[in-house]
Amino acid sequence: MRTRTILLLLTPAVALIAAAAGVFLLHRHLHARDGVPAKATTQLTRLPFALPCSVNTADASLFYAALRRGDRAEVTKMFAADKIQLIRKDTPLSISPGSLFAMVTTEDDKQAPISCFIPGDVVPAIERKAYK
């Protein structure tokens, strides 16, 4: 008798929870496309230092690895071979972060736009040093 009473009390509660979940999911499904997609805004950044980057992701990876190791000979060799470009200090640029590599594009009117790559793990450090 006690089991039947508990069952009679729990059945409407479970039905009510299932109905509420169904209404929530239906509302979410019907109104999922109502929002306007967010526009990707490219915020221009100015850095207080020159930024080394490369048009080749492999060269960018090797350069920053040599920089982290403190291997001056390798860094100098890559600059001499023109594998690394320097984006001048105070040049307006935009950074499109990625998981492994971030694309850096200059937005300077005085020179042709440059697109190059830097490792993705250095982007937070660069953004912390950017002018606010």
Image (cartoon, rainbow, N blue to C red):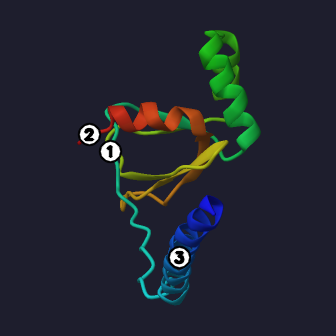
Which residue is outermost to the right?
A: 58
* Residue located at (36% from left, 62% from top): 109
Which residue is outermost to the left?
A: 132
- Amino acid under label 3? Pro
- Amino acid under label 1? Arg
Distance from disc 1 to disc 2, alpha carbons, whole Å, reads 6 Å
* Residue located at (53% from left, 54% from top): 114
Distance from disc 1 to disc 3, alpha carbons, whole Å, reads 62 Å
The C terminus lies in quadrant? top left
Based on the displayed image, in which of its 4 quarters is residue 58 positioned?
top right
Q: Position of residue 33 (x, y in %)?
A: 50, 86
Identify residue for label 2.
131
What crowding class fits label 2: few (fewer than 14 Cα within 10 Å), some (14-19), or many (20 or more)? few
Looking at the image, residue 17 lies above or below residue 106 = below
Which residue is outermost to the front?
A: 1
**In the rendering, which numbered label is found on residue 46?**
1
Contact, CB < 8 Å: mark 1 with mark 2? yes
Identify residue for label 3.
12
- The front one of 111 and 126 is 126
122 on left or right of 35: right
